[in-house]
Image (tube, rainbow, N blue to C red):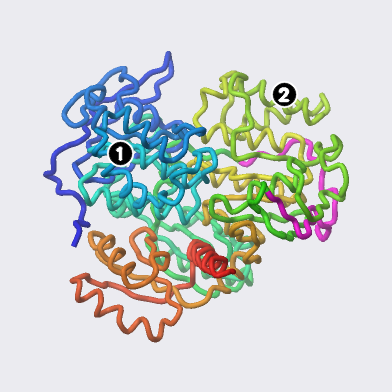
Amino acid sequence: MPRSSPPDPAAALVVSVEGLHKRYGSRAAVAGLEFSVRAGEIFGLIGPDGAGKTSTFHILAGVSEPSDGQVRVLGQPPREARERVGYLTQQFSQYPDLSVEENLRYVAGLRLVPPELWRERRGPLLRRLGLEPFADRLASQLSGGMKQKLALCCALIDRPRLLLLDEPTTGVDPVSRRDFWDVLTTLAEEGVTIVVATPDLVEAERCHRIALVQQGRLESLGSPAELKRELGLSRLELQGAAPAAAEPLLRGGAIVDVQTFGDRLDVIVNDAVAGEAQVRELFRRQGLPLLELRHSGPTLENVVVIRQRRQAGELPLLPFPHPTGCRHQRSDLAIDARQLSRRFGAFEAVRELTLEIRYGEIFGLLGANGAGKTTTIKMLCGLLAPSSGEIVLAGESERLRGPDLLRRIGYMSQKFTLYDDLSIRENLEFYAGVYGIPASLRQARIDWVIASCGLQGQEQLLTAQLPGGWKQRVAFGAAVLHDPEVLFLDEPTSGVDPLARRQFWSLINDFARRGTAILVTTHYLEEAEQCNRLCFMVAGENVIEGSPGAIKAAQPGQVLELVLPPDQLQSATLLLRRHWQPWRVSRFGDRLHLVLDDPEREIEGLRPLLAQAQLSLEGLRRVPPSLEDAFIGTVQRARARQGERP
């Protein structure tokens, strides 16, 4: 059986960082960072936007020199070790006008891989990453998830001993993200050492150890389990009929933090018994139904958010200056699309899609990369003409590109909509002019964006100098400067740290409360729980639609939650995937989820199967499906049905 336990503490050090400093002029990006990484370890570098993670990766990869301190990679200065290091940057670094195979061949040549080794490695590597059927496809025509798999493929062609991954799954859908991490786990078992930065703390739970970084300094270091114990807090999961109404009441006393996830509340308390008593009393006093209260341990996201908040505080939710007010009845349709299709040659990107979105509603459009979400948004806001179908946008069915209508809608695209060679303030002034905001309102609204982003005093920075997450914040501000009636957000929180994501959603909910219709796409399924309704798209089609709770309730079969020792999770995952379809088995932090269509029959063989492999099943219970369970199950079943069509 493959090795699945964490690396031996006595294993050789692959990375050693002591007193690392990196300065850009007077700005300190890294300030005394220290950590080490052992052979065969998956090590997470976790921190908010601007914490110094990318600067650290540049130094480890030998791209830039430290201002001070000592760094060793494979026992050498980073520049001398580069031939044995693979590096995935935040930005896609392959050539868009070359095919998958041409990109791989080109990188193999750069890395001096002999032709016979290239021929030997090419096939297995493409198969491992699911790219063999697409070897002749241009990189520009790949989905986001496939592009990242190609980048990883190129990084692995010369068999590196160390792999540096700077937010490798940003913008990647949950199905591809899980596949990507399965490959990383297998590589670690084969002896490759991996250092990874990720804003997704569910996937960060797969790291052996994690360094929490804040303002270029190390805040804490340990395994995910150690960091959660170190927090010293407990979590209560509340199931109720009105979580949004209950959230504002749950403050003070034993309660440290509260967050709404669709039909449930997560309440972090400093004492589990006192916290439960306080929650039950508050619900009783307000006459709110409490359907279920369950005790649980904090998640890694709880750890990071609470630590960030303690260190840097939380940006306040500032009222939008001089709002126009709700201009429509909430029962009115803001977006009415009927039988919408879009073809590119013989390829049908969107097929007979019908959507209805009302004012004041947050509507989530979810799907795997390449499902047709961005094409749909471009058609709905008039950037792309449909091949067939009808659209009514904000009451207009004609002239969807007319200037009057464009001033009533806001659009934040996947790609940054800011000009890198302009300052933050200059970008905002440009958009204020484009949207025709009256001169009397411009200054107040620009100042609101800058304050909401926490960038006071830095508004003269070029946007090119901002980390990706900060750019996203400013881009969101630019999209809402004119207080739009309809707002399109295409992956607005991609690459944004967890605390900033919460702040994003506070703003999104505030605009919805004032009557703005919002269509949003996201690959973070926990934040998708905040949508009023969701549509899952597969291959251009709407395959299921409803509230998050209704979609989860509609899932066939049953989800089992399995608890095993941490060092057995990967072995159990591999074993179960040999007996069930791989998509049915997924990691959720320190637990496994197994989706069974016939649990009464299938569960009988589960315990003997694990026992025979000498795996210790410490807990087994039936749980409601998470939204990620529902998404992956819906997508995989829909793909199977579509594959059966004549």
Residue 266 vertical placement versus 479 (above, below): below
**Residue at the image point whose x is 38% and y is 33% from the top:** 53
- Residue farthest along the top direction in this orientation: 25
User: On the rendered image, what quadrant is the C terminus found in?
Assistant: bottom right
- Residue 261 falls within the magenta-colored stretch: no
Q: Horizontal and vertical percent for residue 442?
A: 76, 27
**Residue topped by disc 2:** 430
Q: Which SS class for mark 1? A: loop
Identify which amino acid the numbered label 2 is placed on. Answer: Phe
Q: Horizontal and vertical percent for residue 64?
A: 34, 20
Residue 266 vertical placement versus 16 (above, below): below
Name the image quarter holding residue 156. top left
Q: Horizontal and vertical percent for residue 323?
A: 78, 40
Left or right placement of residue 342 versus residue 305 in this view: right
State the CA–CA distance, disc 2 to disc 1. Answer: 45 Å
Can residue 205 be seen at all in this image of the molecule? no
- Residue farthest along the left direction in this orientation: 10
Residue 6 vertical placement versus 583 (above, below): above
- Residue 337 falls within the magenta-colored stretch: yes
Identify which amino acid the numbered label 1 is placed on. Answer: Ile
Can residue 406 be seen at all in this image of the molecule? yes
**Residue at the image point whose x is 52% and y is 56% from the top:** 526
**Residue at the image point whose x is 79% and y is 36% from the top:** 322
Residue 357 vertical placement versus 19 (above, below): below
Q: Which SS class for mark 2? A: helix
- Give the number of the mark in front: 2 or 1: 1
Earlier along the polypeptide chain: callout 2 or callout 1? 1
Bounds of the magenta span?
A: 317-343
Q: Horizontal and vertical percent for residue 167?
A: 42, 40
Name the image quarter holding residue 46. top left
**Residue topped by disc 1:** 157
**Residue at the image point whose x is 55% and y is 53% from the top:** 527
